[in-house]
Image (cartoon, grey):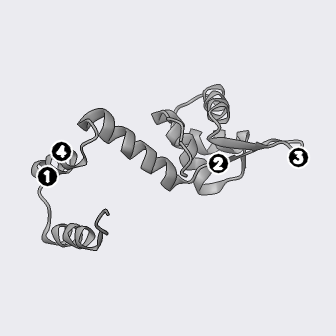
Amino acid sequence: MTRSVPNISEAEWEVMNVLWDKAPLTANEVVHALQEKTDWKPKTIRTLLDRLVKKQVVGVDQAPKVYTFFPLYSRSECQHAEAQSFVKRIYSGTLKSMLVQFIEERTLSDEEIRELRSILSDKPKPN
Protein backbone atom coordinates (compact mmCIF):
# COMPACT_ATOMS: atom_id res chain seq x y z
CA MET A 1 0.00 0.00 0.00
CA THR A 2 1.35 3.43 -0.93
CA ARG A 3 1.45 6.28 1.55
CA SER A 4 -0.85 9.19 0.90
CA VAL A 5 1.25 12.31 0.36
CA PRO A 6 -0.30 15.47 1.83
CA ASN A 7 -0.88 18.42 -0.50
CA ILE A 8 2.08 20.77 -0.71
CA SER A 9 1.73 24.44 -1.65
CA GLU A 10 3.96 26.08 -4.23
CA ALA A 11 5.97 27.84 -1.52
CA GLU A 12 6.31 24.58 0.43
CA TRP A 13 7.73 22.95 -2.71
CA GLU A 14 10.58 25.48 -2.59
CA VAL A 15 11.39 24.42 0.97
CA MET A 16 11.15 20.75 0.03
CA ASN A 17 13.53 21.24 -2.92
CA VAL A 18 16.14 22.64 -0.54
CA LEU A 19 15.68 19.71 1.85
CA TRP A 20 15.75 17.10 -0.94
CA ASP A 21 19.01 18.56 -2.20
CA LYS A 22 20.87 18.87 1.11
CA ALA A 23 19.00 17.36 4.11
CA PRO A 24 19.34 17.19 7.01
CA LEU A 25 19.48 20.96 7.52
CA THR A 26 18.92 23.32 10.42
CA ALA A 27 16.22 25.98 10.10
CA ASN A 28 18.94 28.60 9.67
CA GLU A 29 20.49 26.62 6.80
CA VAL A 30 17.09 26.35 5.10
CA VAL A 31 16.55 30.08 5.59
CA HIS A 32 19.97 30.89 4.13
CA ALA A 33 19.44 28.60 1.10
CA LEU A 34 16.04 30.09 0.32
CA GLN A 35 17.11 33.70 0.83
CA GLU A 36 19.65 33.18 -1.95
CA LYS A 37 16.81 32.60 -4.43
CA THR A 38 13.76 34.34 -2.90
CA ASP A 39 12.97 37.55 -1.08
CA TRP A 40 11.25 35.70 1.77
CA LYS A 41 11.79 36.76 5.35
CA PRO A 42 13.21 34.21 7.82
CA LYS A 43 9.89 34.13 9.70
CA THR A 44 8.05 33.15 6.49
CA ILE A 45 10.50 30.30 5.84
CA ARG A 46 10.22 29.06 9.42
CA THR A 47 6.41 29.14 9.11
CA LEU A 48 6.64 27.04 5.95
CA LEU A 49 8.92 24.56 7.75
CA ASP A 50 6.44 24.37 10.64
CA ARG A 51 3.57 23.71 8.22
CA LEU A 52 5.50 20.91 6.54
CA VAL A 53 6.24 19.35 9.93
CA LYS A 54 2.53 19.58 10.89
CA LYS A 55 1.57 17.98 7.57
CA GLN A 56 4.10 15.23 8.36
CA VAL A 57 5.98 15.82 5.12
CA VAL A 58 9.11 16.91 6.98
CA GLY A 59 10.61 15.30 10.06
CA VAL A 60 12.62 16.96 12.82
CA ASP A 61 15.60 15.48 14.63
CA GLN A 62 15.49 17.04 18.09
CA ALA A 63 18.44 15.10 19.53
CA PRO A 64 21.12 17.77 19.12
CA LYS A 65 20.70 21.24 20.60
CA VAL A 66 19.83 22.55 17.13
CA TYR A 67 16.86 20.91 15.42
CA THR A 68 17.52 19.50 11.96
CA PHE A 69 14.85 18.98 9.32
CA PHE A 70 14.60 16.21 6.73
CA PRO A 71 11.99 15.06 4.17
CA LEU A 72 9.71 12.15 5.07
CA TYR A 73 8.70 11.65 1.42
CA SER A 74 10.94 11.38 -1.62
CA ARG A 75 10.82 13.96 -4.38
CA SER A 76 9.44 11.23 -6.65
CA GLU A 77 6.57 10.42 -4.26
CA CYS A 78 5.58 14.08 -4.05
CA GLN A 79 5.84 14.60 -7.80
CA HIS A 80 3.64 11.56 -8.40
CA ALA A 81 1.00 12.77 -5.92
CA GLU A 82 1.05 16.27 -7.40
CA ALA A 83 0.70 14.91 -10.95
CA GLN A 84 -2.25 12.71 -9.91
CA SER A 85 -3.92 15.66 -8.16
CA PHE A 86 -3.38 17.89 -11.21
CA VAL A 87 -4.87 15.39 -13.65
CA LYS A 88 -7.83 14.80 -11.35
CA ARG A 89 -8.52 18.54 -10.76
CA ILE A 90 -7.93 19.89 -14.25
CA TYR A 91 -8.72 16.95 -16.54
CA SER A 92 -11.36 15.09 -14.47
CA GLY A 93 -8.87 12.27 -13.97
CA THR A 94 -8.49 11.61 -17.70
CA LEU A 95 -4.79 11.40 -18.51
CA LYS A 96 -5.48 11.05 -22.23
CA SER A 97 -7.14 14.50 -22.36
CA MET A 98 -4.12 16.09 -20.72
CA LEU A 99 -1.64 14.36 -23.02
CA VAL A 100 -3.60 15.27 -26.15
CA GLN A 101 -3.75 18.93 -25.11
CA PHE A 102 -0.02 19.11 -24.37
CA ILE A 103 0.93 17.33 -27.58
CA GLU A 104 -1.40 19.39 -29.80
CA GLU A 105 -0.28 22.71 -28.32
CA ARG A 106 3.44 22.08 -28.49
CA THR A 107 5.66 21.23 -31.43
CA LEU A 108 7.59 18.07 -30.65
CA SER A 109 10.98 17.29 -32.14
CA ASP A 110 11.55 13.97 -33.90
CA GLU A 111 13.63 12.87 -30.92
CA GLU A 112 10.85 13.71 -28.44
CA ILE A 113 8.35 11.77 -30.56
CA ARG A 114 10.71 8.75 -30.63
CA GLU A 115 11.13 8.96 -26.83
CA LEU A 116 7.36 9.10 -26.30
CA ARG A 117 6.82 6.13 -28.61
CA SER A 118 9.51 4.19 -26.80
CA ILE A 119 7.99 4.96 -23.38
CA LEU A 120 4.55 3.90 -24.57
CA SER A 121 5.78 0.69 -26.22
CA ASP A 122 7.74 -0.28 -23.09
CA LYS A 123 4.77 0.38 -20.78
CA PRO A 124 3.29 -2.88 -19.47
CA LYS A 125 -0.34 -3.39 -20.43
CA PRO A 126 -2.83 -3.49 -17.51
CA ASN A 127 -4.37 -6.86 -16.70
Of helix, strand and loop, which one carries label 1?
loop
> Which of labels 2 and 4 is toward the front?
4
| Circle 2 Cα neighbour tier, 10 Å, few/some/many (<14 / 14–19 / ≥20) | some
Of helix, strand and loop, which one carries label 2?
loop
Q: Report the residue marked by disc 4.
A: 97
> Which of labels 1 and 2 is toward the front?
2
The span from disc 3 to disc 4 (Cα, nearest Å) is: 50 Å
Q: Earlier in the sequence, mark 3 or mark 1?
A: 3
Instruction: Please give the label number shown on residue 106.
Output: 1
> Which of labels 1 and 4 is toward the front?
4
Residue ID at (72%, 40%): 28
Name the kind of residue labelled 2 in the image: Leu
Q: Measured along the vertical axis of the image, is residue 53 above or below residue 21?
A: above
The span from disc 2 to disc 4 (Cα, nearest Å) is: 32 Å
Q: From the top left corner, tell me how far across and down residue 8 is, in percent.
A: 50, 36
Name the kind of residue labelled 3 in the image: Pro
Corner quadrant of residue 117:
bottom left
Name the kind of residue labelled 1 in the image: Arg
Q: Report the residue marked by disc 3.
A: 64
Corner quadrant of residue 57:
top right
Q: Quadrant of the C terminus?
A: bottom left
Q: Report the residue marked by disc 2.
A: 72
Q: Nearer the viewer, residue 16 or 36?
A: 16
Name the kind of residue labelled 4 in the image: Ser
Of helix, strand and loop, which one carries label 3?
loop
Q: From the top left corner, tell me how far across and down residue 4 is, in percent.
A: 54, 42
Q: Measured along the vertical axis of the image, is residue 10 above or below residue 72?
A: above
**95 relative position to 14: left or right:** left
Q: Nearer the viewer, residue 120 or 69?
A: 120
